Image: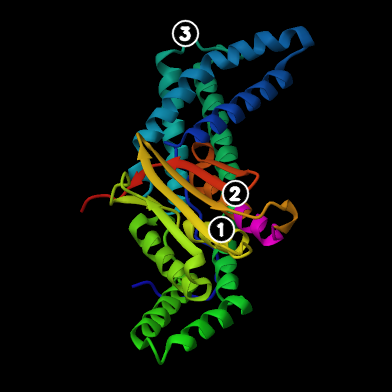
Amino acid sequence: MHKTRSIKQNDRPDALPNFRNLGVTLRILLISNCLALLQAILMASAWSDIPHRMMEIVTLLTPILLASLLLLSTAQPWLNRFTYRRGALAVAALVLMLTLFVNYIGSEYFHPMGGENSNFDAFRYGLISMIESGILLLYFRLRSRTLSRALHDARLQVLRARIRPHFLFNSINAVLGIVRTQPKQAEAALEDMADLFRMAMTEGDDLVPLRQEIQLCKQYIALEQLRIGDRLRTDWQVQDMPDDALIPPLLLQPLLENAVYHGIEPLPSGGCVEIMLRCKGDELHLKVKNPCTLRRDEQHPGNRIALRNIRERLDLLFDVEANYKAERGKDYYCVEIVMPCVKEKST
């Protein structure tokens, strides 16, 4: 059972970048080549000398860079065991050793700076690799710290949604309306409310079992049905979803809340919210579709805040491997998310 914590506590500690992530790999390649271009410009004596210098640097940089990415990707589980500081030192040490090794075995081919002293060349290349590693780690650390605020904001956003006056009062009134005639249903509704508040105020992991998120969402829908009644219907399409799939916590519930609050509730006849979850290859597809009013000006600004929060969390956890798309039709609103299909590790 998770321990509750204050929402004012610090964010999660720093973590090394996931070297197996495509977005991380692309950023490393881009930043490394930009640094190489800067070095070529500083070394060149004229504009025409820049391409020649750049070619010399890339000749040494490419095998070191590709080998480092392969080595760090392989060593990712081992690196994850360390604290951030020790992990960063381990990354720098691995890159340094690989740089010296590549320079040693190819010393007769790698002299981009025209030096003839092999010891000095080894020192120079080792120093450059350490500086570049430090710049890359600092970049990913700052980026993670900036984006990780979305995790805190997500908990705060859901907490505010749970204590939103109209939601709280309407839910209590719905329970009071059936407490005498249907005491068991009223008791179950109060338990659902307690679970929702508990989930909003607990510190979860980056990923939680999908079945847990679905159960939470069904409890939320059950509460809303007490208030809205038969006007709110749901169609769960989860037949192709593996039981051990993982998703970010509180990802699906805000989508359903937006569907109910901005879609179903304003419609006199209500409607059906379609929830589709399936794994296709290595990708998890999540789709929430709901009917809505024809007037586009009825969309509440809070909807955009919640959806932006979800996009930021996906960007933090999966980078470019996650895709988010929202579509507004004439009489419907649809959100579709594609992310890597992560599964629980077997114990």
Range of magenta residues: 299-307
Q: Which label number is shown at residue 108? A: 3
Identify which amino acid the numbered label 2 is placed on: Tyr
Q: Are marks 2 and 3 in contact (CB under 8 Å)?
A: no
Q: Element at badge 2? A: strand
Q: CA distance from mark 1 to mark 3?
A: 65 Å
In this picture, residue 266 sits left or right of residue 12: right
Q: Earlier in the sequence, mark 2 or mark 1?
A: 1
Q: Which label number is shown at residue 289? A: none
Q: Element at badge 3? A: loop
Which residue is depicted at the point 39% across and 89% down?
Answer: 181
Which residue is depicted at the point 53% across and 71% down?
Answer: 228
Identify which amino acid the numbered label 1 is placed on: Ala
Along the line of sight, which residue is nearer the eye, 72 or 241?
A: 241
| Front: mark 1 or 3 | 1
Q: Position of residue 254 (x, y in %)?
A: 54, 60
Quarter of the image with the N terminus is bottom left
Q: Earlier in the sequence, mark 1 or mark 3?
A: 3
Q: CA distance from mark 2 to mark 3?
A: 63 Å
Circle 3 Cα neighbour tier, 10 Å, few/some/many (<14 / 14–19 / ≥20): few
Considering only vertical position in the picture, is 113 above or below 15? above
The question of residue 306 being in magenta is answered with yes
Q: Main secondary structure of the magenta part?
A: helix
Q: Position of residue 266 (x, y in %)?
A: 64, 64
Q: Which label number is shown at residue 259? A: 1
